Amino acid sequence: MSEKRSLVHWFRKGLRLHDNPGLTYIFDEAQVHSCYNVRPIYILDPAVTEWTKIGANRSRFLQESLEDLHNQLKALNSRLYVIRGSPSVVFSRLFKEWRVEVLTFEENIEPYAIKYDTIVKELAKMHNVTVKSYHSHTIYDAHLVIQNNHGKAPLTYQKFIEITEILEQSKPLGKPKGLTNLNEPEKDSCEKEDINCYMFPNLEELVKCKEELGANIFRGGEMQAIKRLNEVLANEKWVMEFEKPGTKPNSLEPSTTVLSPYLSFGCLSSRYFCQRLKDILKRHPNHTKPPVSLMGQLMWREFFYTAATYEPNFDRMMGNSLCLQIPWRSNAAHLEAWSFGRTGYPFIDAIMRQLRQEGWIHHLARHAVACFLTRGDLWISWEEGEKVFEELLLDQDWALNAGNWLWLSASAFFHKYFHVYSPVAFGKKTDRSGSYIRKYVPELLKYPDDKIYEPWKASLADQRKYGCVLGTHYPDRIVKHELAHKENIKRMTAAYKVNREVRTGKSEEDTVDVVRKRKTKYSSKHSAKKNKI
């Protein structure tokens, strides 16, 4: 067993060296006091895969990120110790065997993480280990935002911006300085009595179904994150003119930054991204503004994180104080058709196939398929869509995933439920020729431009000529949008009425009566004033 005491940093989401206050702390302490070993660890917890389903593409991204992290730590004369098991079991052993004096980690608001926080802190207290945790996954500490809003989460973007404008932003940190020597834990501290059991996982360990892997377009890791950030910010004109609604959801190459996976895994610090953006915007005063600007997109991330910090049941309908209770229907066949891109709506199917193949889709494309699944066409609960995104998205983030589904289903934050995305017209606006559809729905490759979005309008003879007969080579559409969305608007109207009555304790008739009386009272006063004049 090592004679030196250990300083441990527990990597969770913040898989990076830059702007990592917990990691910097233990490196700085080790520089000052040579009596310490530095132990940066990552725990592969099997319980996490039970709590959240992680798809093959995201598992590969994690594996690449851990490998990159290990290599970067080696350059600082350290290394990454990857440990398999539950945090409660792992720390019970490590606190004793490594003679841990200080444990640092980044705060995580997800329910399973909060549970482990409590357990690990109790274990640390039992072993006389000092715990230092940091809020470094977001620009602002969500608890401070809530505190400055009278103990509640701001539920509008504008209110959130008003509050954060008076809060001070912490400046991002650089990378820690390298260590003078490398200290390995003794072999008897490893259950397998083999130092290799601390190695980062290979692809085979994390990806069980290799056939589910798509093209590796976005590689994981901090080095890739910084490279992509530099490439994006190099075009300062594009940055200052960026407007999210003006980007294309169905362009063959991404029309946005695709930095979200790196922010989600913490390969890129949001504070560092924010600082780099500010530096550019200072040089170009005539830039776009939130909520549509690039800075505005970062603030949306902060907005949803704050709401999720306030509401522990943020990812579900029942027990969620922010969410309307809507009587969604179950339809396993429709859910599967949507999940695998077999709805018969080429634009919707192309998006879902891109998601399954590449692990990323444009934000506005997410809007289209989320609306289609829920209030637009299929009337299936947003929780079902949330689960699919949780598995397939590289940038899956508990707070953002749930927040966007709440918004798009008009269950919270956004209530103009009568504004429905057309599964035909929306895609046509930015890709009239259907190039995006031809790439991801190759069955329709030979369909002409005027039929590519609505193949059901082609005659059977033409379908045969194009080499794709509906119902044989490509599905018939599972619902008729022109009828379904109108019926669903009626359902949403009824659901809003019930929720309003529950919230106010009054029936719709009572509410109408109150409004009528107010109008009568106002009319009488107005009439009296006119008579006086």
Image (cartoon, rainbow, N blue to C red):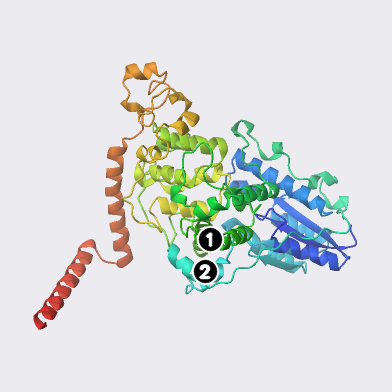
Read off the residue under disc 2. 164
Q: Are marks 1 and 2 in contact (CB under 8 Å)?
A: yes
User: Taking 293 as reference, is 224 above or below it?
Assistant: above
Query: At 50% across and 44% down in the image, what residue appears?
Result: 362
- SS type, badge 1: helix
Please report whichever mark, 1 or 2, sits nearer to the chain's N-terminal start: 2
Q: Nearer the viewer, residue 428 or 150?
A: 428
Would residue 186 appear left or right of 505 to someone viewing this image? right
The amino acid on which the numbered mark 2 sits, given as a three-letter code, is: Thr
Q: Residue at x 43, y 54 (%)?
A: 317
For disc 1, the neighbor class at 10 Å (few under 14, some 14 to 19, many from 20) is many
| Coordinates of residue 18 in the picture (x, y in percent) | 71, 58
Q: Quadrant of residue 124?
A: bottom right
Q: Is residue 506 above or below residue 369?
A: below
Secondary element at image label 2:
helix
> In this figure, which residue is indicated by the disc labeled 1?
302
Please tell me which residue is depicted at 43% across the width and 32% down the height of the picture.
434
Q: Is residue 304 left or right of residue 204?
A: left
